[in-house]
Image (tube, grey):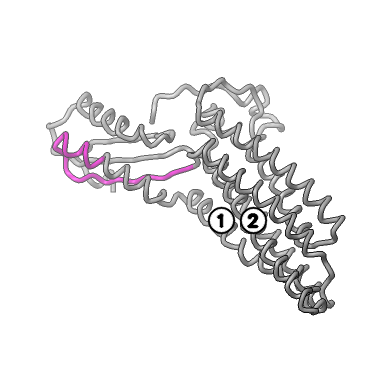
Amino acid sequence: MPDRPLPDLDGPGVDGPDAGGLATGPVAERPDPAAVGERAALIGSIVASSVSGVLAVVWGVLSGARIILFDGAYALIGIGIAALSLRIAHAVAAGPTRRFPFGRDGLTPLMVVGQGVALAATLFYAGTDAVTVISEGGTAVAPGNVAAYGAVTGLISLAAAWWLRRKAPGSDLVDAEAQQWRADAILSAVMVTGALVGFGLLAAGRADLADYVDPVLVLVACAVLVPTPLRLLRSGTIELLEGEPPAAITDAVHATVDEVRHRFGLDEPIVRLHKLGRKLYVEVDFVVEPGEWDVSEEDDVRRAVAAGLEPLGLDVWAYVELTTDRALVE
């Protein structure tokens, strides 16, 4: 296990009834640029979601457009998710404690799964409401309101997604936020397209059909946005179940291990890896002949593997072992 200090970050109530919050004690200062960027990105997302959500609710109430109110609900839910993500990022950045000796990085994929569930529930509710409106004969909405709103929020969403990815490119929490903003940009494009269809129907004298544009837009938006919660649920669940990391990380680890193996003249090792938030666990087990290696040489192999994994930009916990008994590592 890596040699890491375990500060007491749980506070005096570590064994008391109030223990178990995300961060119940003073947090050690960690001048980690990645954590700082992640925090700034999440705060920026909260601010942008607040502006977008208030705009949507006011505009939706005044115009009576369900598609705009749906977008407002989507944005307001995003505020709560971003705020909780910020809290989780704070807890994860605190690092290992006596109560959590491996840290609390598991909160990151858990939050990603929570985001997926929340978004899926929102889409289900909106879709059900749209079907109800259609069954009742639709509702009249001015296409101009929908088009103008879609154009404004589309620009906000694209700018937010672009800024988030630049601010914290390696953060799973921020990536989930960026996916939501990108989905919102798609929703805005659907609005503008639907509004144009509404203009066309009104111009053709088919106001009866134009009344169905708003609820149909909601259904189309739900269908377009479905992949977003599915991606979040898939990626978060894979991490929670200790599945294999993304291909880019897996390939980089195997390339590093292969280079070290050739440098030290070792046989093909057994490699296991698992990503949990920003933490990457790497286990590399080499089987060697008895009497050929000592502890200091084994340490050289460990250092070489650890150094090769540094460019990944993750918190790597590397476990490298040389053994003469394959049964111990299989």
Residue in the image at 50% along x and 31% along y: 34
* Residue 258 belongs to magenta span: yes
* Residue 33 belongs to magenta span: no
Residue at the far right in the pictured view: 62
**Whole-percent x, y for residue 87 in the image:** 65, 35
Q: Amino acid at mark 1?
A: Leu
Circle 2: element type: helix
Q: Which one is nearer the viewer's eye here, 264 or 213?
A: 213
Circle 1: element type: helix
**Whole-percent x, y for residue 280 in the image:** 42, 39
Left or right: 180 in relation to 315? right
190 w.r.t. 173: above or below: below
- The mark total stands at 2
Q: Which one is nearer the viewer's eye here, 203 or 256?
A: 203
190 w.r.t. 200: above or below: above
Note whether residue 111 is visible.
Answer: no
**Boundaries of the magenta span:** 257-276
Q: Amino acid at mark 2?
A: Val
Residue in the image at 62% along x and 26% along y: 10
**Whole-percent x, y for residue 274 in the image:** 41, 45
Left or right: 89 in relation to 327? right
Q: CA distance from mark 1 to mark 2?
A: 7 Å
Would you name the residue on which mark 2 appears?
117
State if disc 2 and disc 1 touch (CB < 8 Å): yes
**Whole-percent x, y for residue 321 in the image:** 27, 36
Circle 2 Cα neighbour tier, 10 Å, few/some/many (<14 / 14–19 / ≥20): some
Residue in the image at 54% along x and 57% along y: 231
Numbered circle sitting on residue 299: none
Tell which circle, 1 or 2, labels the residue nearer the N-terminal end: 2
In the rendered image, which quarter is residue 98 located in?
top right
Numbered circle sitting on residue 233: 1
Residue in the image at 71% along x and 32% along y: 18
